[in-house]
Structure formats: structure tokens, C-alpha cells
Amino acid sequence: MLEYLGRIGYAAEDLNKLNVVHITGTKGKGSTSAFTDAIIRQAKPGWKVGLYTSPHLVAVRERIRINGTPLSEEDFARYFFEVWDKLEKNDVVDATILEVGVGGTYDSTNIVPKPVVTGISALGIDHVTVLGRTLKEIAWQKGGIYKPGVPALTVDQPAEGMNMLKERATEKGASEFVIISKTPGLREIRLGLSGAHQYQNADLAIHLSRKFLQAQGGLEPKDSLTEYEINGLQSAKWPGRCQTVPDPNQPSITWFLDGAHTLESLDCCMQWFVGPHTALRNETSSRPKRVLIFNCTSGRTGPAFLEAMLGKIAAQLKLHGDDEDAVKFFDDIIFCANVTYMSGNFKGDLANKNTAEADLVQLKTQHELEAAWRSLVPSFGPDRVHVLPSIEHAVDLIRHQESPTIDVLVAGSLHLVGGVIEVAGLSEVAL
């Protein structure tokens, strides 16, 4: 990245002009970024605030947002080709919230020498641990975003991870190492992002934005939540994460979208989906038909994922006083490939090179998921489990269901969620 930056006429120090809030973590780094962006924009409505996140759901332009809006196709194309030749100089940026893509130390975003503040959301065991990494090693990697003379923030972490983060903050020469405290009054606010786990991300965003606004905007932190913080937390959007989207074309269908793809994030997903809204639906109207559309990167992890989801469903139903059997919670299960269209083609922005073509053709992962589900729930009717070759096949099946109301949970993969948004025509209401 440093070499590429030099080739287009910049030094790493030039990136400091972007006034960066650098954020990483295993879970919640994207949500924290969205909250931080929203708070700063509410505090300084006249500022130009950039938000960089990854991956995108439908269009690559979503990764770069200016004042909450993805770059237009025209701007993206223009800037792309200007960068291709030489980056057009633009130092009129008041704030940039920069989400790490993978890890921290070796991530492409980690070339900013002196961000204004850095933060680490919850550490945990994620998909990178297939390489055998321990929590301590993950913390070492994430702590690589800490910088000399820059405040280093983190949420409360497991002891092994916390000790390593402290060591990294000292090693990197951070100006201070802060384990954030809970913000008084925060739990009384209805956040713009659903899910109980979002309150920890919101806490981190509040502390990050306060450090940033004190340094860059002359706003002294308050003991209680300010109006702009409350407005920011309530207005924050983060598509495809615990998101409820009424179908604009078929009112009987409600889409519940969550790109959860680790055991911990799936636990949060089921806590959200099998929550008060489920009990409310059961009390106020006839029970909706419930469908799960699911995929994951490898069928080998499927049994653990599906078993954990069933366990969480049972726990949530019990918590909300619902005597429904967890194995009967979903009426239909769809395991589909992340291929966008029935033709076998991907939308350009959604092309996925991480799955072998032979596996896609044979639907190897999807059949492994089907076998895992049948093993876990032998009583589940054979006509209620569907293995489909594309997302368009899955959406078509949903659209032809005969039921007054249908709740569809889409989970296991951000690529899958993005494909559903594209194929089902949800972009205008979801993004």
C-alpha cells in the first residue's frame, strides 16, 4: 500500500490530513464506525465527513460514503480513473471514519501514520481462527492500529486479549490507553441499529467521537449525553446487520437481514430475530410463516452454526415465555449458493472468487448444510428443506409462497445478504 501510495504521488503522512478515526475489532467494528460517523455529523453538520467500510452489500461504491451518502456512479468512475493516473489532491476533509478490513497490523487501512484516535471493538474468535490463531494473537494483530501519541481506546475484553492490547499500546507509544466506561443514560435510547449487542458498539462510538471532537472541533466532553449524540445514535444506519426491511413489492413479506457469519454474531442474530417482535406477532395476529435463507463459506462449519442457532432459538423462546418448539420455529429452510442470478452469473459488484467453481456447480456446501440440518432435526419434512443454485432461485421461491405474512431471515454471509437486496429489489429501502 505504501508503494502504491508513492506511485500516485503521496506520502503516508499526507493521509493525516484526512483526520482519521481508525476502528478495528472482531465484532462490531462496522457498527461502531456507523455510530461514530452519525455522531460527528450531528455534532458538526457543516463538516465534510467520510466513512470507509468493507465489504459492500450491493455496490462497491457503498464502501466510500461522504456525509452518509455512497459515491455516485459518476463520481466513482471519475475518481477511479484519476487515481489510476494520479490521485487528485483533495485535503478538504474534516473527519474520516476508517474501518479496518481484516485484522489490523497488516490491513491496507493501517498506513495512516497519525490518526486522531483509534478504537478496538469486541475481540472474539472469528473466521480467521481457522488458521489456528489464539485470542492473544488476534489482539496483537488488532492492536497494530495503535499509534505514537494517539489515544488508544477499547471496550472491555477477555483478560488474555486485554493484556495484549495494553502491551501493544505501550509498545506503540499511544498517548493513553482507555478501557471505556458505560455511558449513563445510553440504555434508555432506542438505537438506530437493532440488537442488544449494539449498545457496547454505541458506547465505543461515543468515546471515540468525544476524543475526536475535543481534538478537532473544540467540543469539550460532557458528563451526560448531548443532543447531537442522541440524534446520531438514533439516526445511525448500517445496512444488512440486524436490519428489518418490509418488501416494497410484496407487502406480505418482511425481510430480516443479518450478515452474521461467526458463532458469536449468529448468537446475536438469533437473539435479535427471536425477540420481542416474534412474541408480539404471535399475540396480535396469526403466526407468520417463517423462512430461513442461509449459506456459509464452508459446509464444515455448518453443523456447529446450525446447532448453535437451534439452541439460541430455544433459549429465546423460553425467555419470552413462548412454548413453541424450537425445531418448528422455521417452516422452511433454504440453503442457496451466493450466485446472484438464475443464469449462474454474479452481479459485477458481488462476484465471489473464494469458492471453487466445482463446489458451486455441485452445490457441495449447500448439500453439506442440508445433511447437517436433517441430522439435527430428523423430523423436519423433506419438502421443507430446499437446496438452490442461486439467490434469485431463493427469492423466487419466497415470492411464490402462499401465506398472508412471511418473515424471512437471511443470515450466514454478507454476500448472501447483498445478493438478496439486489435480486429482491430492496436497495432503495435497505441501503
Image (cartoon, rainbow, N blue to C red):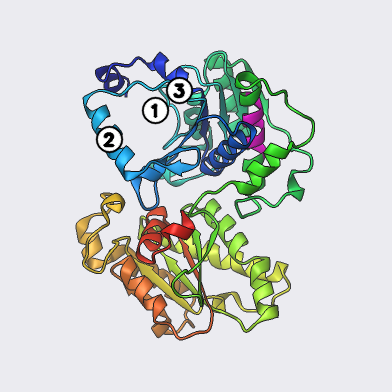
Say which amino acid is labelled 1: Tyr
Say which amino acid is labelled 2: Arg
The relative height of residue 149 versus residue 283 in the rendered view (above or below) is above
Mark 3 vs 2, N-terminal side: 2
| SS at circle 3 | loop
Mark 3 vs 1, N-terminal side: 3
User: Which residue lies at the image location 45% right of the left edge and 63% below the top edge?
Assistant: 303
- Marks 1, 2: nearer the viewer: 2
Residue 237 visible in image: yes
The relative height of residue 336 versus residue 106 in the rendered view (above or below) is below
284 displayed left or right of 12: right
Magenta segment main secondary structure: helix
Q: To which residue does mark 1 refer? A: 106
The percent coordinates of residue 367 (x first, y second) are 33, 69
The reply to whether callout 3 and callout 2 are in contact (CB within 8 Å) is no
Magenta span: 203-211
User: Which residue lies at the image location 32% right of the left edge and 39% below the top edge?
Assistant: 76
Mark 1 vs 2, N-terminal side: 2
Q: To which residue does mark 2 refer? A: 78
Task: Decide: few, some or many residues near mark 2? Use Cα within 10 Å; few <14, some 14-19, many ≥20.
Answer: few
